[in-house]
Image (cartoon, helix red, strand yellow):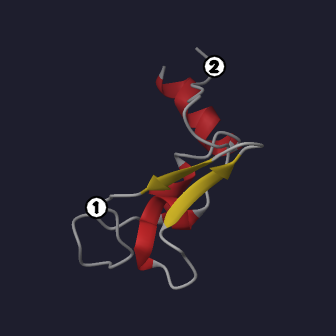
């Protein structure tokens, strides 16, 4: 196997979608606009940017979720 593709997320998820309401510039929710409707997603997560928390979301947690991260794909191919 050369890589793993997750079809349930974007290639580079914005941090405010992962961290939720904790970020200052975040509105806390994600929405998709379509021609005749809008789907609103409410986020509930334990991830935080507080370094002392067991749920600290560090850079490695972010990079592993990016599909186009070449270094991650190389590591995955070596492990599998």
Check the image and name the residue furthest to the right.
35
Q: Nearer the viewer, residue 37 or 4?
A: 37
Q: Quadrant of the N terminus?
A: top right
Percent across and percent down for residue 26 are 54, 76
Percent across and percent down for residue 59 are 50, 63
> Tag count in the figure?
2
Q: Which residue is mark 2?
A: 2
The residue shown at (33%, 58%) is 44
Any mark on residue 46, and which? 1
The image quadrant that residue 71 belongs to is top right
Percent across and percent down for residue 46 are 28, 61
The image quadrant that residue 48 belongs to is bottom left
Q: Is residue 80 above or below residue 7?
A: above
Q: In the drawing, does residue 72 fall left or right of residue 59?
A: right
From the image, state whether disc 1 or disc 2 is nearer to you.
Answer: 1
Find the distance from the CA under tag 1 to the CA under tag 2.
Answer: 31 Å
The image quadrant that residue 14 belongs to is bottom right
Q: Is residue 2 above or below residue 52?
A: above
Q: Nearer the viewer, residue 22 or 76?
A: 22
The residue shown at (44%, 66%) is 19
């Amino acid at each position: 196997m050369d890589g793993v593709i997750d079809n349930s997320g974007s290639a580079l998820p914005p941090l405010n979608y992962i961290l939720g309401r904790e970020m200052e510039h975040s509105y806390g929710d994600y929405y998709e606009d379509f021609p005749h409707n809008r789907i609103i997603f409410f986020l509930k997560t334990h991830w935080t940017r507080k370094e002392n928390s067991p749920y600290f979301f560090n850079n490695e947690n972010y990079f592993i979720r990016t599909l186009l991260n070449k270094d991650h794909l190389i590591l995955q191919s070596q492990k599998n």
